[in-house]
Image (cartoon, rainbow, N blue to C red):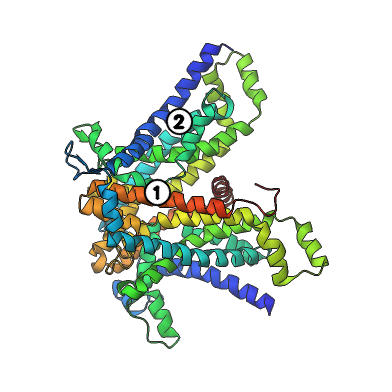
Amino acid sequence: MKKFLHAAGLTLFALTIVVPLLWVLVNSLKTGSEVFSRPWGIPSSPQFVNYKNAWNEAGIGKYFLNTLLVTVGTLVILLPISAMAAYIFGRYPFRGSKTLFSAFLGGMMFPNFLVVIPLFFLLRDIPLGDGNMLDTRTGLILVYVAYSLSFTIFVLTGFFQALPGELAEAAMMDGCGHAKTFWKIMLPLARPGLIVVGIFNAIGLWNEYPLALVLLSKDENRTLPLGIADLVMSQHYASDWGALFAGLVIVMLPVMVVYWIFRDKIHETMLAGAVKG
Amino acid sequence: MKKRGRTAFIITFLSPAVLLYGVFVVYPLIQALLLSFYRWKGVSKNRTFVGLDNYKELAQDQTFHKALSNNLWLMVVGGAFIVVLSLLLAHGMQSNHKGVRVLRGLYLFPQVISLVVVAIIWQFIYNPEYGLGTGLTKAIGLSGYGQPLGTSSQALTAVGIAFVWYALGFYVMLFSAGLKQIPEEVTEAASLDGSTGFHRFKTITWPMLWSVKRISAIYIVINVLNIFALVYIMTKGGPDRATETMLTYLYEQAFTNSKYGYGTTIAAANFVIAMILAAILMFVFRKNPEGERA
């Protein structure tokens, strides 16, 4: 009896997770009328055209490319500058370095949304091209970099501390300067850490909604979460339900695949970040 | 190595991160504190210093009270469900059975997909016409349900269920890690002493989970006070403010009504409330009954 309850409980848990996700997947292959008439049924013939419609007609393709651009753009800036700072915090202690490190970690404690109002006006006041940084992907990328620094530096500092010091010393003996030792020897050694923290950040950035909501407004700049939320809230989808579900799959599937491949590492990183608090 | 080269190196390597962090994180944070003492419609330069007026207004604001009490309700009721469920599930997932291994790969999915997707999925689940829930209740012979998200008395519970669905995995992960840390000898010794089942749980397991309980409590406070996307997309705080939370109210005041000073005051209040609750938790969990671990 105990064994049965155990198995039943875990099965129920698994079903509550899997069924809603599968339902979205199945609905993404139904015609609009099938979504209504048979909520629990399977499509009579899979409507792959929903994906085409979502991508082209509903604008998901455009939002997808924006999200890709913003995510990659953020990582390209974030990873080197975090690695540089983490290298200093991990291996070059100086007077005040502990305080500065704590100031960076402090950013993990308060929610970004608390500063959205000043951030909104800050971007409006920074000139860029003919206008300002508000409602630009560049502005969003810089904000994303800034708000990802805390966690990234925290994880990478641990990585650099754990690397053997002899290698760096040997390189310095051979006449490499501080910077060359970092780029040629230490950074390549920290690659596993960079990959993990990069993937972890990528998932968060891909999904980010509140900052994008406040800082972007033009349709052409919108990221995936913004675009799909707007489709739902403004009821544009009413004409094509299947395409809307296809859009949801396009938003969540890449993250699920990446998570599945790297789940053990992501798990470790999440725990490390959580337990530090 | 030359001392001078070292200093220059440190400065060069730190400055990009310090610069970005200073401009986009620290500066707005200071601004956020200052802005809450102003009345400001967002038109540049034209701000009026009003001292504590915004805070006084907030103290009288019925909608803010409603939002705060909704946040606290989600924290207490949702938090209780989360702790009980994640403890049970983490316990059940200790074995190395094949099914459990698959479940371990799955249970964080709600946590890693976008909250926007979570909100939309649950909005659809609650849809009275074609939602998953309607289909399910009809399938077991009931008449389906009305509109949980459109009914004042049900909306907060409906949002709460979606929140628990989203958040649960993270806490299952924490409790799993906590249970794994309990040395096997301890449980074995307890079993030999004839301590089993609920008694063993009460005397051994529960006290030994001290640090996990502390972390979970703090995360629940932070997570619930930060609820925004889920509510904003599912209900926009409605119907009739039934699901209004502090951050959805902040968004409305600032970006719909252009009351930026007042919006910042809500943010500051949210932050202060988080600090107070964290301080209370630190006090409650001030001493580890097990002593040795921090």
Q: Chain of mark 2?
A: A
Residue that badge 1 annotates: B271
The mark lying in front, picked from 1 and 2, is: 1
- The amino acid pointed to by label 1 is Phe
In the image, residue B37 lies at what x, y percent?
27, 43
- Point 49% across, 41% down: residue: A151
State how many labels appear.
Answer: 2
Residue A227 or residue A13, whichever sits in front: A13
Distance of label 1 from label 2 (alpha carbons): 29 Å
Neighbours of disc 1 within 10 Å: few (<14), some (14-19), many (20+): some
Q: Position of residue A17 (x, y in %)?
A: 50, 66
Q: Decide: few, some or many residues near mark 2? Use Cα within 10 Å; few <14, some 14-19, many ≥20.
A: many
* Residue A81 badge: 2
Q: Is residue B250 left or right of residue A163?
A: left
Question: Does B74 appear above or below B148?
Answer: above
- In terms of image quadrants, where is residue A71? top left
Q: Residue at horizontal 47%, vertical 56%? A: B221
Is residue A198 shown above or below A4?
above
Residue B225 x, y percent position in the rendering: 41, 55
Q: Share a chain, discs 1 and 2?
A: no
> Mark 2: which amino acid?
Ile
Residue B270 drawn at (x, y percent): 37, 52
- The correct choice, above or below, for A79 with respect to B183 in the image is above
